[in-house]
Image (spheres, grey):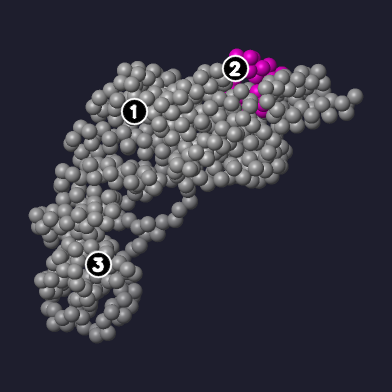
Amino acid sequence: MTSRFEGDPLASEWRAQLAEATFTTLDLEPLQDEDARALASGLLAASSGFVERCLERAAGNPLFLEQLLAETQQSLATPEVPGSVQSLIQARVDQVDIVDKSAIQAASVLGQRFDLLALRCLIGNPHYQPSQLFEHRLLRPYGDAILFGHALIRDAVYETLLRNKRRDLHLAAAEWFAANDDPVLRAEHLDRAEDPRAAAAYLVAVRRLVESYRYESALRLADRGLEIAVAPGERYELAFARAELLEQLGRVREAVAAYDLALTTAMNDRDRCRVRIGSAGAKRTIDNMEGAFADLEQAEHDASELSCTEELARIHFLKGNLFFPSGKTKDCSREHEHALELAKQAGSVELEAMALGGLADAQFVQVKMVSAYKLFDRCVNLAQKNGLVRIAAANRPMAAIALYYSGDTATALDVALLAVTEAAKIGNKRAESIAQNAAAFCYRELERYDEAFDHSEAGVNLARSLGARRFEAIGLYLRGSLLRLTGDTDAALYVVNEALAIARETGMAFAGPRILGELALITDNPEVRASALAEAEGLLAKGAAVLNQLEFRKAAIEASLKDCNWDAAERHAELLEDYTCAEPLAWAERVIAQARERLAARK
């Protein structure tokens, strides 16, 4: 990309947002004398005092020099050198006939690059050809389109337009782009025409861009629409769309603030209900569970009063999701069953697919991984069949994890990698973070540690960009286990302690026990090991997310075997067996079998 000195973003917060991305900057200085002369000799063979004055006046600006010399070619008798690019271009435009002048003025409204058919429409001449403007080097062909010779040429021409003519041309352009199904350019031209329909047009354009997952562009339009919107309904819809876009882009803390703004623009209880549901989802991502439950409680009150079945389905779906990380099986299952019932009442395939994913979560927390995978698969297939790409992307990572614990690591890896690609394509950073971790788990199991490290790193970076500290802790825990397996104990200990600190900050029920189990495996200090194992058991007794039970018991078995504590190893194997007895779990059966083989061998 390029930037003029004025408004250069590199000195602003934009650079900070690049984080550690590598980039190169090239500062283009004015042409040196010898280069300017080389350019001049290529454009004008004659050497004259006028050329010398052109070189002096251009002061190394290649555009100015090119235009000055082009002017000289048109009229070698020109006595004076124009004082600026602006005055030069205006003088050259004044030399073309009235048809071409009208055409280039209309073209300046269309932008730096434009379609000939659009230009013909604006000037009302279906046969117009810009041959003279090409000869004057004001315009040039660019594939199937036409391009101004330079952005400054376009700007100079545009500045000559009187306000009324500029407005009329922008309105004509808006009609052209409406007829050609381009809502984005229609909205922008209505805006430049200062037409009161512009804000509503921006809303239409935002929705079209969202359909094609162009969230950054959609956010820019939502911001502009909100700046000019006057009608209360338009302000609400644009503010709400802006909050959803920020959340989709992973700027979740900004999204929470944007939902607060949208709440102030809401016109009725139903609007406020929608905003609170969106806000609850964003707060869940950044682990503000208390705030999310509070939003849903108020939203449920409003939705019940208004008998809004779809909103109630979304509320119960989100409640189930909030119960999922804490391992509250009955609550999670109850809420998702209620969500599915309401989705069917509302006749919404989207909500039905979401509820199926929620019910899969409920099976997941009951350690019924085969059943969970079947429901995730139903959810993803239903979503794909109906073009619900975001729902498919949100649930495929969990399908991969369910497959992994079901014992089919190779297939789970394929699903996880597909989930990574799918989530990245639509910008769902939360789903991509989970999918990256799922892929890392599979690669770890397959002892392909380099690939596991790569996916673990990607998962941590995504979690950090989201501000999702719980997911960051999981990624660091995973990285710590990989460092242990590859022999870097010191680094492993440091990283796992970092994960543990985050877990203590965000709530130990989500990931604390498995992190403590990994700490017990890494440390050479018997007291630290015993303390970690005891703390984890205490947390499990109070209730913790399902994967803690699985991963901790596996780590505890290995730690006990490492200490030659045979009774403890057998006890953890038995507890894992009891925990997974509701439905056969190949992953657990393999862990238990390996433990008992080692226990038998020591005898």
Q: Position of residue 274 (x, y in %)?
A: 34, 28
Neighbor class of circle 2 (other Cα within 10 Å; few <14, some 14-19, many 20+) is: some
Task: Report, in whole angstroms, how far the alpha carbon at label 1 lies from the one at label 2.
Answer: 32 Å
As drawn, 224 above or below 302: below
Query: Does residue 410 show up?
Result: yes
* Numbered tag placed on residue 543 in the rendering: 2
Estimate the x, y position of residue 176 in percent, counting from the top left.
22, 57
Mark 1 residue type: Arg
Judge from the rendering whether residue 526 lies leftward or rightward of residue 232; answer left or right: right
**In this picture, which residue range is highlighted in magenta?**
530-551
Q: Quadrant of residue 597 in the image?
A: top right
According to the picture, the residue beneath numbered tag 1 turns out to be 274
For mark 3, what is the residue?
116
Q: Secondary structure at mark 2?
A: loop
Relative to 210, is 437 on the left or the right? right
Measuring 18% from the left and 80% from the top, which residue is drawn there? 74
Q: Which quadrant holds residue 260? A: top left
**Dot 1: element:** helix
Q: Nearer the viewer, mark 1 or mark 2?
A: 1
